[in-house]
Image (tube, rainbow, N blue to C red):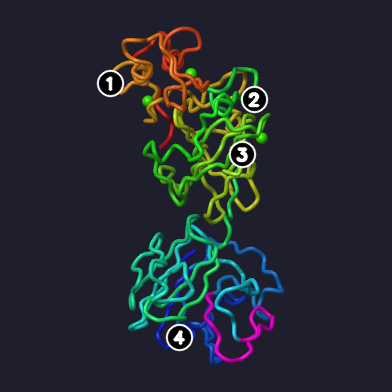
Amino acid sequence: MTLKIEVLVDMKDLLNGWSEIYLGSDGQPRYRSNNGLVGTGTRITRVSDAAVTPPPPTPADDLPGEALDTEFHVMPNGTIEAINARIIPYPYPQTGVYPRMYDMVVGGTTYTFTINTGGHPFVISNSIAGSPSNAGQVITDGVTNSGAGSGVVTFTPNASHADLIYYQCNAHLNMGWRINLSDPVILVGVKAYLEGAYNAGSPPMRDDLRVGGHIPATEPYTALGYTYVGSSGGSVAPAVLAVTGNDAIVDWVVVELRDNNTPSVITASTAALLQRDGDVVSNDGTSPVSFDVPAGSYRVALRHRNHLGVMTLNGVALSPTSTTVDLTTVATATFGTNATKTSGGVQVLWTGDGTFNGQVKYTGGGNDRDPILVGVGSTTPNNTISGYLGTDLNMNGTTKYTGGGNDRDPVLLNVGSTTPNNVRTQQLP
Ligand SMILES: [Ca+2]
Ligand SMILES: [Ca+2]
Ligand SMILES: [Ca+2]
């Protein structure tokens, strides 16, 4: 959805800020100012809402006769005002608990503000106070043209924004009001096995990295050069890594939602955790992975730091109800050819990409074998080293070049034992 909102200087109250803007049950925008002025249409334009499926309205939260789905509020003036069918005593405190407004500013959606406020620069802020207390509180992440007094400001909320933020005049106190950001609206329950941690035919996966205390508290992919879309990585609490059994954590992974029509485009991505039984969960260790994007069809991709990533061939309809995407079965078609490996009757992600470049390569420049040897020491090939290392391709906490259970053989095996010059390439567009 694109929601276009015009913020005009004559719609604000000098003491109390811009007027309240909301959408009525007929989908038409309305505004009302602190002096009781109610208007429709001309100043507020909803460009398109074709992609939006609003959550069902809660009658108690609605204005009489209205199914609100977007509201921007300003401080009221000196009277009692009914908002969402409740009588709210005046004056409002500037902070504190308010009757819950309908939260419909959705992460991942771009909102367009057309600004014509003269000397009142328009910003999105973490503070309700406004200038000068607004200093350092202005949000620029996801905002274009912040501070404009005229022209267009766009705001695309993402997961790094707080649930409650504000739009503000950046030159005056108390001119602005709150924006409620909705909670993540998409849940996805990916299931997958990593070959390196999987003993063929005998699930669940091993959690040797966790047992050895090697899994880092902060996701590792940023450090490997991966750039998240719409999220900022994350960390895991020690208690989550203390869980044992089938839901014990095997490693960090990345879940990507890709554009269904142009699957080379990553719409959103986030760090997540993989359990021994294959469940990919959020950083709390148990919940499905969530994204701040509208419901719809997405290709779902899974990445791992030393395995080849994989993506569904088809779009998956995702919604606030978690949808399972089981990459362990051939029944879930995947993009490309042999995107996963069959092992013990299930599909597993190919191990061997210790360099995280999308290729498993045994010989030649940029191969995945040499870093193993370099890691243990080029002149001491029988040496082993332990830790959270990309070169630990069988995910047992140790990097080993020679002898039983080494990390070199999986590279050769996955390019083809008799074709060591082959390169196996990740099947992602
Ligand atoms: Ca599980
Ligand atoms: Ca590689
Ligand atoms: Ca190893």
Displayed quadrant of residue 355: top left
The one nearer the camera, 164 or 31, is 164
Image position of 266 (left or right of 246): left
State the separation of the CA atoms marked 1 and 4.
Answer: 64 Å
Give yes or no for residue 133 being in the magenta stretch.
Answer: no
What span is in magenta? 72-90
> Which residue carries the number 1 mark?
365
Q: Earlier in the sequence, mark 1 or mark 4?
A: 4
Q: Residue at x 48, y 46 (%)?
A: 260
> Which residue carries the number 2 mark?
204
Task: State yes or no: Cβ of the residue under disc 4 lies below 8 Å from any atom of ligand 1.
Answer: no
State the separation of the CA atoms marked 3 and 2.
Answer: 18 Å
**Residue 331 percent location from the top left of the image:** 61, 31
Question: What element does badge 2 sit on?
Answer: loop
Type of secondary structure dominating the magenta stretch: loop
Q: Residue at x 63, y 32 (%)?
A: 248
Question: What element does badge 4 sit on?
Answer: strand
The one nearer the camera, 195 or 427, is 195
